[in-house]
Image (cartoon, grey):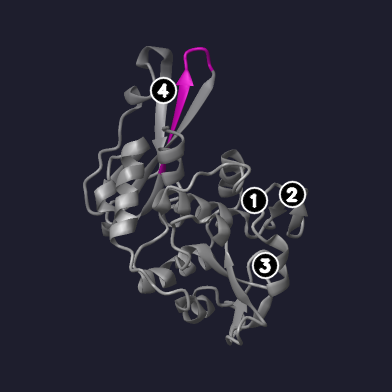
Amino acid sequence: MFSISLGDSFDTPGCELYFNLSDIVSCDISGFVDSSTAGTYTLTYEALMTDSSVETIDVVVMVLSPYYASLVGLEGDDLLLAMRTLLTETMIDLIYDTAITVLPISDADPLMTGQVLTVYDRLSVDATWDGGATWNREHVWPQSKLGSASDSDLHNLKPADPSTNSSRGNAPFGQGSGKAGHVGGAFWPGEDDMGDIARIIFYMYVRYGLDITESVIGALEMFEFWHEHDSVDPFEANRNDVIATYQENRNPFIDYPCFYDLIFESE
């Protein structure tokens, strides 16, 4: 996996980087990297081996936007610490009530003007703030477990149906199926939100150093599964953009999902 800055030149590595040339008959490389456009690109190496088998390797190249320039080429703890510094230094500390104004925009129902989508049950409700009667502010990482971390970080706040918010309480997340709800002593967020929840948990781990443990918030391996099987959609990407206009820092795992591998798989 590679990370480069926007506009940097990138020379596609040859097959010799991934295969012993004496073991292959031929090797084809497909895919491209447009270093003028920020994003995640995949190069596929397909080698015909001397034993007639075919081996395929996918190589990910992240072209990082200027916001992430300080993270180029890093992985593991080096990336974790640099990312924490970036998210901390670029973040504007907002008051808790700011969420009343921002969440109706960041989590607006894209199909219904004036409506907001609630987390977990995906209800479309009137976005007008009425003191929390129609929707209230859910801390994905529960407020009672934040310690010294901010309770007003917009990345961790989602509009929620009051009864659903109350039902979840401060339970850790757990694997389930179908509609959101409790699974034993844990809470299943539903298939539509599981990836979004995982990426919020990763953000909170990096930004504040909160530990991802099964008893507190849920198992890391479960969040990894959710992250991989519920990819970033336009709704989540737009939410990240909206929050960044107010709070100025971003959720890196929404912009570049492969940051997960570079941090967690390199430890």
Residue sitting at the far left: 8
Label 1 crowd bin: few (<14), some (14–19), many (20+), radius 10 Å: many
Residues marked 2 and 1 touching at CB (< 8 Å): yes
Question: Distance from label 4 to label 3 (Cα)?
Answer: 57 Å
Location of residue 151 with respect to 106 vertically, above or below: above
Q: Residue at x 26, y 58 (%)?
A: 66
Q: Residue at x 46, y 34 (%)?
A: 265
User: What is the chief secondary structure element of the magenta stretch?
Assistant: strand
Q: Which residue is mark 4?
A: 26
Residues marked 3 and 1 touching at CB (< 8 Å): no
Helix, strand or loop at mark 1: loop
Q: Which mark is residue 172?
A: 1
Label 3 crowd bin: few (<14), some (14–19), many (20+), radius 10 Å: many
Kindly tell me whether residue 215 is visible in this rendering.
Answer: yes
Front residue of this view, candidates 84 and 265: 84
Residue 14 horizontal/vertical position (percent): 31, 29
Q: Which mark is residue 185?
A: 2
The residue under label 2 is which amino acid type? Answer: Gly
Q: Looking at the rendering, in which quadrant would you find the N terminus?
A: top left
The residue under label 4 is which amino acid type? Answer: Ser
Q: Residue at x 54, y 73 (%)?
A: 107
Q: Which mark is residue 165?
A: 3
Front residue of this view, candidates 28 and 152: 152
